[in-house]
C-alpha cells in the first residue's frame, strides 16, 4: 500500500476535499491500484533525460504590459453564490 | 431535408435557393427533439438559433455572409460563450454563465456559424464514455445501450445523429478522436498550441486542445483554419502561419506510412478493428505508398505518463473551484475551510475527486520527483521516440480504439480499464502532434470503427490532405464489397 488512511486524509485536506463516510476503503484501493500502475515508469532509465515542461518550441510570446479591465465588478460578482454588490461573502473568518 | 456531409454542399443549396438557414435550424431543432433519449445536449438555444438564422439569411442575400454561413454547430460544455451557461458537465458549476467568449468560439461566430446548444460531456472532460457527467450518460445513436465515448460524447453523438452539422470538442488524451470513432464521425485534434485555449475550461493545460467533430475532413480543415492562430489571451499559441487547410486537400505523392505492428496483431484489439485497419494499410500499399511496421518500445508507458501529468495539472487547475467566486456552494458550511471542502466534495463527482487526489499525491513534496518529474522525463523520451519515427514516416496509422463502443456501465467500476480506451490516442497529446479519427467501416454489429492518422507537430496541412484522400480510398473500398 502506497497510501494508508492517514495519507489519504492528509491528501484530501491538501486538496480541500472530504473523504465521504463509507467510501474510504474503495477509494484507497482504487488510488493504490492506479499508483502501482503508474510506477511502471520506474522500469525506464531516465538518467540524464531533461524533464519536458513545454511541448511547443515557442519561447516568450510577449504582449504589451498594459493594464486593462476586462471584467467589471458587476460581471465578476454576477456568478458568486453570495455577494453584497461590492464584495464576495464567506462565513466569518475572524472570531 | 437532405443529409449533408459537407458545409460546401449546404452552402451550394443556400446559394441555389434550395434551403435557408432558418429551415436548417428548424430541421436540426426537430431532430434534437426527436432524439432526446440520446441526452446529447445539456441546453438548446432554440429561439436564439432561429433569430440568428434569420440574420445570417439576410447577410447571405446581401452577399456579406461569413465563411461558415449555414453551419449549425454545437459546443461541448467546456467552451465559454458569453451570456450562456457552461459547466463542464459538473454540479460544481451550477448556474454559471460565462462573462466572456472563448477565442475559438468567437472566431467561428465571426464567420456566421450558428450555435444551437451546448453538449453533454464527461465531468471536466475526464472520462472515455460520457458516463461521468452530472447530466447523466449520453447514448450512442448506433446502439442506445452503448456509450458514445468521451469525453466529447454529446458532441460526437449529436453529429452522428445529425442533430447539428458539426461540433467543437476538446481533446486532452483522445476526447475528440475516441468518441468520433465510436460514433462514426471525423474528429481532429490539432497540434498543441495551434488553437487558443482561452475560454476552454482547463483540465490539463499542457495537453488540452480544442478540435472539431464533423461529417467530413474538409469541414474539419475549414473549422481549423478559422479557429487557429495567435491570440493575445493565450501565450502558448504558436505564432506559425496558419495555412488555408481547406483549399489544399488533394494528396497525390507517395506517402511513407508507419503502423504499429501490435495494433494489428494484438489480441487486445478487437478482430474487426484489426481487419479494418489491415484493409486500409493494404489499400495504401496497392496505391503505391510505402507501408511499414514500426516499433514503439515506449508504448506501454504512454498512459501512465499521461495520467501522472494530467492528474497533477488537473489538481492544480481545479483548485480554482472554491465555492466562493462562482459555482456551487454547499449550504452546510459554517467556516471558510469547511466551505471549501464541503462545496468541492459535494460539487465534484467521483472520477474528478479521484484524479484531484492522485494529482495532489504525485505533486506532494515526498513524491514529486518519483512521480511527477519522472513522468516529465519519460514525456521527453516519448517525444524523442516519436520524432525518430517521423524522420522516416510522414504518417503513423493505427486504430483509434482497441474496441468499438462498449455498453453503458461496462467499465465504470474499473478506472484502469476505462483509461485503456485511450491507448492509441494519448501519444499525440503527450508529444503535441496533430491526429485525426476518420470513419473506417463498422463491425458485424454495425458499430462504427475509426482509423487514426497522426503526423508530426504542425503538419496539419499534410495530415488533412492525406486523410481526405484516405477517406475517399476507404469509401471506394467499401463500395467494391
Image (cartoon, rainbow, N blue to C red):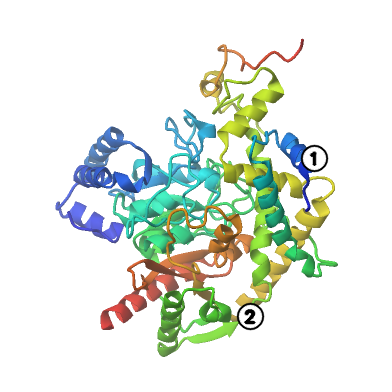
SS for tag 1?
A: helix
Give percent across and percent down for residue B201: 55, 41
Residue ID at (61%, 59%): B416
**Could you tell me if residue B249 is visible in this image?**
no
Q: Write down the residue under mark 1.
A: A6
The residue under the point 62% across, 15% down is A89
Secondary structure under tag 2 reads loop
* B349 displayed left or right of B68: right
* Drawn side of residue B304 relative to residue B103, left or right: right
Question: Which residue matches tag 2?
Answer: B295
Does B136 appear above or below B327? below
Foreground of the two, A25 or B135: A25
Q: Residues within 10 Å of mark 1 (few under 14, many from 20)?
A: few
Residue B35: mark in rendering: none
Residue B417 in which image quadrant: bottom right
> Is B52 placed above or below B416 here?
above
In the depicted view, which residue is nearer to us: B205 or A31? A31
Q: Residue B445 location in percent, x, y?
A: 33, 69
Q: Residue B440 appears at what percent x and percent y? A: 38, 72
* Quarter of the figure with the C terminus of chain B: bottom left
Residue neighbourhood size for the residue with mark 2, other residues' Cα within 10 Å, grouped as few (<14), some (14–19), many (≥20):
few
Q: How many marks?
A: 2
> Which image quarter: residue A22?
top right
**Which percent across, then down, holds residue B297?**
68, 76
Please determine whether, in this image, residue B189 is positioned above or below residue B259: above
Q: Is residue B375 above or below residue B444?
A: above
Amino acid at each position: 500500500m502506497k497510501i494508508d488512511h492517514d495519507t489519504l486524509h492528509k491528501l484530501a485536506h491538501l486538496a480541500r476535499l472530504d473523504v465521504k463516510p463509507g467510501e474510504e476503503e474503495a477509494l484507497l484501493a482504487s488510488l493504490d491500484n492506479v499508483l502501482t500502475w503508474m510506477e511502471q515508469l520506474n522500469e525506464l532509465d531516465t538518467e540524464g533525460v531533461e524533464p519536458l515542461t513545454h511541448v511547443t518550441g515557442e519561447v516568450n510570446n510577449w504582449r504589451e504590459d498594459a493594464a486593462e479591465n476586462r471584467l467589471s465588478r458587476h460581471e465578476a460578482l454576477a456568478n458568486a453564490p453570495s455577494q453584497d454588490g461590492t464584495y464576495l461573502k464567506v462565513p466569518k473568518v475572524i472570531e | 431535408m437532405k443529409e449533408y456531409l459537407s458545409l460546401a454542399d449546404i452552402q451550394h443549396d443556400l446559394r441555389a435557393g434550395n434551403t435557408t438557414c432558418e429551415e436548417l435550424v428548424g430541421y436540426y431543432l426537430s431532430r434534437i427533439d426527436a432524439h432526446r433519449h440520446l441526452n446529447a445536449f445539456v441546453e438548446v438555444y432554440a429561439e436564439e438559433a432561429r433569430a440568428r438564422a434569420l440574420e445570417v439569411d439576410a447577410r447571405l442575400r446581401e452577399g456579406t455572409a461569413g465563411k461558415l454561413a449555414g453551419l449549425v454547430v454545437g459546443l461541448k460544455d467546456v467552451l465559454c460563450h458569453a451570456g450562456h451557461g457552461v459547466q463542464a458537465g459538473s454540479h460544481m458549476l451550477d448556474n454559471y454563465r460565462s462573462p466572456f467568449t472563448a477565442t475559438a468560439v468567437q472566431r467561428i461566430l465571426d464567420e456566421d456559424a450558428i450555435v444551437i446548444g451546448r453538449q453533454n460531456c464527461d465531468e471536466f472532460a475526464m472520462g472515455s464514455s460520457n458516463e461521468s457527467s452530472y447530466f447523466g450518460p449520453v447514448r450512442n445513436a448506433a446502439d442506445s445501450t452503448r456509450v458514445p465515448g468521451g469525453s466529447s460524447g454529446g458532441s460526437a453523438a449529436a453529429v452522428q445523429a445529425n442533430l447539428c452539422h458539426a461540433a467543437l470538442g476538446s481533446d486532452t488524451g483522445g476526447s475528440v478522436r475516441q468518441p468520433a470513432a465510436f460514433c462514426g464521425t471525423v474528429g481532429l485534434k490539432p497540434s498543441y498550441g495551434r488553437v487558443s485555449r482561452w475560454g476552454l475550461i482547463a483540465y490539463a493545460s499542457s495537453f488540452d486542445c480544442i478540435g472539431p467533430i464533423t461529417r467530413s475532413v474538409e469541414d474539419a480543415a475549414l473549422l481549423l483554419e478559422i479557429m487557429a492562430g495567435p491570440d493575445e489571451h493565450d501565450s502558448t499559441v504558436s505564432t506559425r502561419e496558419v495555412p488555408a487547410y481547406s483549399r489544399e486537400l488533394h494528396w497525390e505523392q507517395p506517402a511513407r506510412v508507419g503502423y504499429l505492428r501490435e495494433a494489428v496483431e494484438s489480441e487486445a484489439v478487437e478482430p474487426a478493428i484489426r481487419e479494418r485497419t489491415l484493409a486500409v494499410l493494404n489499400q495504401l500499399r496497392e496505391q503505391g505508398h510505402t507501408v511499414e511496421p514500426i516499433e514503439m518500445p515506449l508504448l506501454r508507458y504512454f498512459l501512465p505518463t499521461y495520467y501522472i501529468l494530467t492528474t497533477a495539472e488537473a489538481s492544480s487547475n481545479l483548485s480554482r473551484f472554491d465555492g466562493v467566486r462562482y459555482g456551487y456552494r454547499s449550504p452546510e458550511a459554517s467556516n471558510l475551510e469547511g466551505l471549501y471542502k464541503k462545496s468541492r466534495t459535494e460539487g465534484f463527482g467521483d472520477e474528478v475527486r479521484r484524479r484531484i487526489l492522485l494529482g495532489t499525491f504525485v505533486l506532494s513534496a515526498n513524491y514529486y520527483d518519483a512521480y511527477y518529474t519522472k513522468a516529465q522525463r519519460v514525456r521527453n523520451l516519448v517525444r524523442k521516440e516519436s520524432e525518430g519515427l517521423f524522420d522516416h514516416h510522414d504518417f503513423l496509422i493505427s486504430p483509434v480504439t482497441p474496441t468499438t463502443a462498449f455498453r453503458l456501465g461496462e467499465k465504470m467500476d474499473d478506472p484502469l480499464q476505462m483509461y485503456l480506451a485511450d491507448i492509441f490516442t494519448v501519444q499525440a497529446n503527450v508529444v503535441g502532434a496533430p491526429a485525426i479519427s476518420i470513419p473506417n467501416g463498422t463491425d458485424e454489429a454495425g458499430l462504427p470503427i475509426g482509423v487514426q492518422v497522426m503526423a508530426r507537430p504542425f503538419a496539419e496541412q499534410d495530415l488533412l490532405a492525406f486523410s481526405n484522400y484516405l477517406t475517399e480510398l476507404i469509401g471506394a473500398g467499401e463500395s467494391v464489397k
